[in-house]
Image (cartoon, rainbow, N blue to C red):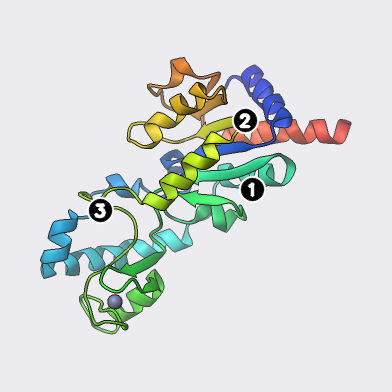
């Protein structure tokens, strides 16, 4: 980790009033969870809608995976960002992850860009369920859960399946927040897919400082103000520690 750069980033955080953070699958993997959208679990939306066997298989897989999701603990990265919310001008966290770990760590302003696996929505009448409720239906013997409101079997988590656009409200809200930010920190997020691939460039067009913290290189690295190659679970607590030192000294 480049500690000097991390120290400079700590200063930028102290000088900023509206910080927006984007997090992604490196944080999930620090908590032992896979990149769900790339895991191959979600079938194409057309097949899911039309094919009962595919639906039944999907719910069977969710039932297998779900305990590891709800038992996963926030990583030091999630915890550092929760602390940052308390000691800095953090406006909000956007995340590509869908496991609710920022909420679990105690962060309050979180926008889940890909929505969440923790709840399920009826595509026919719009009724919402917790994933727990749906899994107990399956436990009681329904291979394919049905909506208690309208009887439809078109229930799915609100995240995008292949063939579906990403959730709209979240993307729009993220765009508005980013527009008004003065510092944008991207931590452990993949910048390979739109809309997030454009975010660092949109921020630079508006003269917003951009920092990338990641173990991996990204196409935006040469265009931003600072890049720290390292594990977010080491870099973020280090930066937060620097800021706290500053607070106790002054
Ligand atoms: Zn319904």
> Which quadrant is the C terminus positioned in?
top right
What is the quadrant of residue 191 in the picture?
Answer: top left
Position of 28 compared to 110: left or right?
left
- Give x and y (percent) for residue 105: 59, 54
Q: Nearer the viewer, residue 211 or 70?
A: 211
- Give x and y (percent) for residue 116: 40, 57
Q: CA distance from mark 2 to mark 3?
A: 33 Å
What is the quadrant of residue 149 in the picture?
Answer: bottom left
Q: Does the residue at mark 2 contact the one at mark 3 (Cβ under 8 Å)?
A: no
The tag earlier along the polypeptide, 2 or 1, is 1
Q: Which mark is residue 112?
A: none
Q: Of circles 2 and 3, which is in front? A: 2
Q: Secondary structure at mark 3?
A: loop
Position of 129 compared to 237: left or right?
left
Q: Which residue is mark 3?
A: 161
Residue at the image position 56 percent from the left and 31 percent from the top: 184
Position of 147 compared to 18: left or right?
left
Q: Secondary structure at mark 2?
A: loop
10 Å neighbourhood of mark 3: few (<14), some, or many (≥20)?
A: some
Q: Nearer the viewer, residue 245 or 113?
A: 113
Q: CA distance from mark 2 to mark 1?
A: 19 Å
> Which quadrant is the N terminus positioned in?
top right
């Amino acid at each position: 980790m480049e500690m000097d750069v991390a120290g400079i980033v700590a200063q930028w955080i102290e000088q900023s009033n509206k910080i927006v953070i984007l997090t992604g699958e490196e944080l999930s993997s620090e908590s032992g969870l896979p990149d769900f959208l790339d895991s191959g679990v979600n079938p194409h939306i057309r097949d899911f809608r039309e094919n009962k066997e595919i639906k039944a298989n999907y719910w069977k897989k969710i039932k297998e995976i779900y305990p590891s999701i709800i038992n996963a603990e926030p990583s030091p990265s999630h915890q550092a960002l929760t602390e940052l919310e308390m000691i800095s001008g953090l406006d909000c966290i956007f995340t590509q992850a869908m496991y609710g770990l920022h909420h679990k760590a105690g962060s309050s302003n979180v926008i889940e860009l890909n929505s969440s696996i923790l709840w399920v929505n009826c595509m026919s009448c719009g009724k919402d369920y917790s994933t727990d409720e749906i899994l107990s239906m399956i436990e009681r013997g329904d291979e394919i859960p049905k909506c208690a409101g309208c009887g439809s079997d078109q229930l799915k988590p609100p995240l995008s399946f292949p063939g579906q656009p990403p959730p709209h409200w979240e993307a729009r809200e993220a765009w508005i927040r980013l527009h008004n930010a003065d510092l944008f920190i991207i931590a452990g997020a993949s910048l390979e897919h739109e809309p997030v691939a454009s975010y660092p460039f949109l921020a630079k067009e508006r003269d917003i400082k951009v920092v990338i913290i990641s173990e991996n290189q990204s196409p935006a690295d040469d265009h931003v103000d600072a890049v720290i190659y390292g594990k977010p679970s080491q870099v973020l607590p280090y930066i937060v520690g620097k800021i706290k030192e500053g607070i106790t000294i002054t």
